[in-house]
Image (spheres, rainbow, N blue to C red):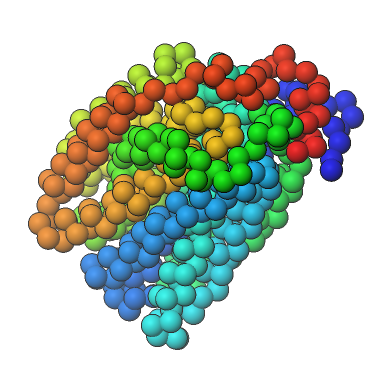
Amino acid sequence: MSTLPAGADRRALKRRAVVASTVGTTIEWYDFFLYNTAAALVFGPLFFDSAGAGGVLAAFSTQFVGFAARPIGAAIFGHYGDRIGRKYSLVATLLLMGGATVLIGCLPTYASIGVWAPILLTLLRVLQGIGVGGEWGGSVLMAMEWGHRRQRGLMASWPQVGVPLGLASGTAVVYFFAGPGFLDGGWRVPFIASIILIGVGLWVRLSVLESPAFAQIKTSGKVAKLPLAETLRTQWRDVLKAMFVRTAEQAPFYIFTSFVLAYGTRQLDLDRQQLLLYLIVAACIGIISVPFFGWLSDVLGRRLVYGVGAVLTGLYAFPYFALLNTAVGGLILLGIILGLVFHDMMYGPQAALISESFGTGIRYTGAGLGYQLASITAGGPAPLIATAILAGTGSTTWISIYIIICAVITLVALSMMHPRPPEADEADEASEEHAGQDTIRNASQA
């Protein structure tokens, strides 16, 4: 049992929680997006013995397996996060995700062990999916539940910054090593280097205290015995709404960041290094735009900001490919940047929008499950669907229509979402700046 550090104040503890959540999430998404980039560029010929469209489809299929495993991770770690606490669940997800990533970098290829290569790759991708599936809910809640109730959009958006940071860093490492020897072994270095990030993440996360809101639940003896069962019994509709509201954010995002690499290099004969650089630039902009839109949702309302982002994403479906098809560097960069900025309009407010639908006692499970189920219905299938459409029609027209359909689904789900007011949850009172030192001590002991 830890004690409150001498001289510590609430603001310092809040900053530490935000930093720990953001750093840990960045590391997790670095690992996850690293796989996505490799799936688009190298896994086809190395693990499936095919450099053509069939190899790309097979590689994206293993990518989808990781998405399918994410709800499992949300259910497993949501259970322990709602019963034991956010902090130690986050430590476990970091170890699981990082360990799987390092092992991927050590895997023999198809040329060495035949069919066992894709089988082992798929199993490790499942572990990655379970790890990142349990990560999101805990990291978001660790930041959000330390913050003021009127700042939840901004507070919950900081862990979301881990997505552009992870995308930028993972893509940058691939960019750096994507030289002539990339297929011969250079691709392994970014995966194995994750072992360093694991150490950094553990050091940061073990130093943070439990969130005051969860500490209040634990002190009052109101911890849910079976968080998953209670969530599905009392708030299954909110889980489904959370899943569908992510459709316009999740599916286009993986078209904009993963499929674009395969499309650009194979269909448009664009330089791989150039595309990676454009993606890094666009991701870096997200480091600013994600928290900005999170803050804006505190000012204008979550649903308004989120809805505008969904509408713009739908309207952008055809212009996006028109910009790519010009094969002009500046226009391609503009196309990638705009796609991710419209995504960020939804991703910034999203964590608070979804989390506020659930009470503190089942929030890790409910929010995490709703968030991660979209990985099966939207994020995971998107590159597969886009690749299959392109292979079958030779055109991007139906890919654009697919993006528009995703936007419509999101808008319908958004119209049905009515988050719980913070004052309806007694434990959320502990998030207020005026909460006493007793609550902070409870957090240190949880």
Q: In which quarter of the image is residue 106?
A: bottom right
Quadrant containing the C terminus in the rendered view: top right
For the question of whether residue 254 can be seen, the reply is no
Classify 153 as above or below 230. Answer: above
* Left or right of 46, for residue 287: right
Q: Where is residue 229 in the image (x, y as percent from the top left)?
A: 50, 45
Q: Please tell me whether residue 315 is drawn above or below residue 93 in the rendered image.
A: above
Q: Residue at 43%, 46% (x, y): give it.
A: 372
Could you say which quadrant of the image residue 296 lies in? top left
Judge left or right: residue 289 versus residue 324: right
Determine whether, in the image, residue 319 is placed left or right of residue 218: left
Q: Please name whichever residue, 35 or 212, is drawn nearer the observer in this view of the structure.
A: 212
Does the image show residue 199?
yes
Which residue lies at the image location 43% right of the left edge and 82% below the top edge? 116
* Above-or-below relation of 329 to 123: above
Question: In percent of the image, x 84 and y 40: which residue is there?
Answer: 2
**Could you tell me residue 326's position as x and y percent?**
18, 44
Query: Looking at the image, which is closer to me, 420 or 343?
Result: 420
Residue 50 point in image, percent of width and height: 29, 75
Q: In which quarter of the image is the N terminus?
A: top right
Which residue is most to the left? 393
Depth check: give the residue in front, 294 or 152.
Answer: 152
Q: Which residue: 24% across, 70% down?
A: 54
Image position, residue 110 (x, y; %):
40, 81
Furthest toward the right, the residue is 6
| Number of callouts | 0
